[in-house]
């Protein structure tokens, strides 16, 4: 099984959760649209028990992950999460891609966007890529954007992302209409990029999605094909992911090799674990 441990490396002997082809390559999940119909219910106790993502003046409510996971106990997904925790891992490649965790660099990206007075979200089409809890997409939604949320695991979208979006629509009688401003897709980036081609985006936001160098071509192709010609993508990440090999410098090299995009470091953290934000645009003719 392929597991990623961001501070150490190791092998796991359980092989029943990752699907591989006859060459040993991971068979990534096909992309599919997730329709938010079952989740449109009165918030009830979810509101009183919700936790708060707070970054400066930005406050975004989110459900308690342990409670969400309890709703899907006994599934292959919950088994994968349990195994990842047992192995002190953040994910299991191809099976569980860390969507239950609010990644550290999410705070950095929200704080950075808040500091940019010239960044206009109103009416823009925004993609929250590898969204997990959906914090970045909800931030854009609160700023007036039409948001697409994409995460690898369907279960994350159903039990965490969509409930979080609904939780942040304050007036219950408006939920049915407001949620229509959002779309939700699960599965692999390559599959998503090929199957759902109708939308291009003014802004793409993604946090800590460049830990696996094997997925760089998929991610860059998605930026090339789905980012508006005048659009911008922001990638927040740790400079280097120990035990994995991916990081900002490696991703910059992959972008340069592709030749169709331009990247620049627009923010760099000070002290502690090194973190950066890349601003990515199409090459100008």
Image (cartoon, helix red, strand yellow):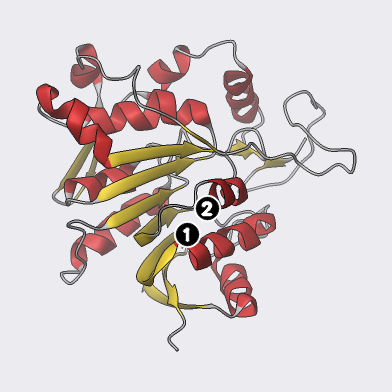
Q: Please tell me which residue lies in front, 5 or 30.
A: 30
Residue 176 figure quarter: top left
Secondary structure under tag 2 reads loop
x, y percentage for residue 190?
61, 51
Name the secondary structure under disc 1: strand
- Residue at the (65%, 25%) spot, across then down: 83
What residue appears at the point 19 percent right and 12 percent down from the top-left corner? 44
The percent position of residue 92, horizontal first and vertical second, equals 65, 36
Question: Horizontal placement of 78 versus 266: left or right?
Answer: right
Find disc 2 in the rendering and name its residue.
209
Q: Which residue is mark 1?
A: 237
Structural crowding at the residue carrying mark 1, measured as other residues with C-alpha within 10 Å and reported as few (<14), some (14–19) or many (≥20): many
- The answer to whether any part of residue 188 appears in the image is yes
| Tally of marks | 2
- Residue located at (72% from left, 46% from top): 9
Q: CA distance from mark 2 to mark 1?
A: 7 Å
Return the residue nearer the eye: 247 or 19: 19
Residue 177 placement (x, y as % from top left): 18, 31
Marks 2,1: beta carbons within 8 A = yes
In the picture provided, is 194 more to the left or to the right than 126? right
Answer with the quarter of the image where residue 206 lies: bottom left
Measured as percent of width and height from the top left, residue 155 is found at: 49, 25
Is the residue 261 above or below the residue 47 in the image? below
Question: Which of pointers 2 and 1 indicates the residue nearer the eye?
Answer: 2
Q: Is residue 127 left or right of residue 89?
A: left
- In this rendering, the answer to whether 59 lies above or below 127 is above
| Label drawn at residue 19 | none
């Amino acid at each position: 099984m392929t597991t990623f441990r961001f501070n150490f490396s190791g092998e796991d002997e359980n092989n029943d959760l990752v699907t591989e082809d006859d060459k040993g390559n991971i068979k990534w999940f096909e992309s599919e649209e997730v329709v938010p119909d079952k989740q449109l219910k009165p918030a009830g106790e979810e509101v009183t028990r919700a936790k708060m993502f707070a970054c400066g003046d930005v406050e975004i409510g989110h459900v308690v992950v342990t409670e969400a996971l309890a709703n899907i106990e006994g599934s292959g997904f919950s088994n994968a999460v349990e195994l990842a925790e047992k192995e002190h891992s953040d994910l299991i490649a191809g099976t569980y891609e860390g969507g239950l965790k609010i990644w550290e660099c999410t705070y950095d990206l929200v704080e950075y966007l808040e500091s940019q007075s010239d960044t206009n979200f109103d009416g823009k089409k925004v993609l929250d890529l590898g969204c997990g809890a959906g914090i970045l997409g909800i931030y854009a939604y609160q700023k007036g954007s039409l948001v697409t949320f994409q995460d690898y695991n369907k279960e994350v979208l159903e039990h965490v992302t969509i409930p979080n979006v609904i939780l942040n629509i304050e007036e219950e009688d408006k939920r049915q209409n407001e949620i229509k401003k959002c779309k939700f897709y699960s599965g692999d980036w390559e599959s998503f990029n090929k199957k759902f081609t109708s939308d291009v985006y003014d802004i793409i936001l993604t946090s800590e999605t460049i830990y696996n160098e094997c997925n760089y071509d998929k991610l860059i192709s998605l930026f090339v094909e789905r980012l508006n010609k005048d659009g911008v993508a922001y990638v927040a990440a740790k400079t280097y992911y120990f035990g994995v090999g991916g990081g900002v410098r490696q991703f910059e090299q992959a972008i340069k090799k592709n030749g169709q995009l331009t990247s620049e470091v627009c923010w760099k953290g000070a002290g502690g674990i090194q973190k950066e934000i890349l601003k990515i645009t199409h090459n100008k003719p």
